[in-house]
Image (cartoon, rainbow, N blue to C red):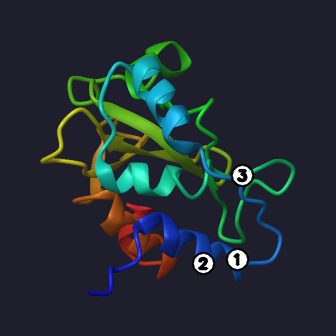
Amino acid sequence: MTMSPTPGELLAAHWSEMKGVAVRPSLGPAGINRLESRVGLTLPRDFKSYLLVADGFAAPSDQDLNGFRFWPSNEVALVDAFDGGRFASADTATLLLFADYLGWSWAYAIKVGSEGNSSVHIVGTVDGCPHRVADSFAEFAELYMTDDARIYG
């Protein structure tokens, strides 16, 4: 039985075809455990599959040609703890920021702590409310790789 590639493997293949993007190596299982301990929540399986392949983008080539920046794990943070809670709302307690667009025009956060819901949301919008853009990190990765309009809010 052939296994389908993980979201992390698909993203790594996508990035390997791009010019000018430097991808940090795998965070590894121990690094994932440290990240989960730091944020105090369990990461969704599909997001872990990404971290097992890549730990975000590396400076100085840390933004893709469309302006997306996947953050290294040391920058990943809960929305409510990020920038003094500037983007916190009643809906952000379990949202973990992992990427931004165009130097923080907005950011992307994944719902953590619940295996059943790993939805991805845009955070930092004008109305201050997170906007759901994908039902899972795997779906977000697919939308990102195809440059689907839904990831732009």
| Labelled disc at residue 13 | 2
Q: Give the crowd class for mark 3: few <14, some 14-19, many >=20 residues within 10 Å.
A: some
Image quadrant containing the N terminus: bottom left
The location of residue 118, given as percent across then percent down, is: 24, 49
At a point 32% along the width and 86% down the height, the residue shown is: 2
At a point 33% along the width and 34% down the height, the residue shown is: 95
Q: Is residue 79 left or right of residue 103?
A: left
Q: Which residue is mark 3?
A: 24
At a point 31% along the width and 25% down the height, the residue shown is: 41
| Labelled disc at residue 16 | 1
> Label 1 sits on what residue type?
Ser
- Between the residue at mark 3 and the residue at mark 1, the CA separation in whole angstroms equals 12 Å
Q: Helix, strand, or loop for circle 2?
A: helix
> Label 2 sits on what residue type?
Ala
> Label 3 sits on what residue type?
Arg
Q: Helix, strand, or loop for circle 3?
A: loop
Q: Which of the two discs, 2 and 3, labels the residue nearer the N terminus?
A: 2
Q: Is residue 36 above or below residue 118?
A: above
The location of residue 46, given as percent across then percent down, is: 34, 56
Q: Nearer the viewer, residue 89 or 65?
A: 65
Q: Residue furthest toward the front?
A: 1
- Is the residue under label 1 in contact with that under label 2 (CB below 8 Å)? yes
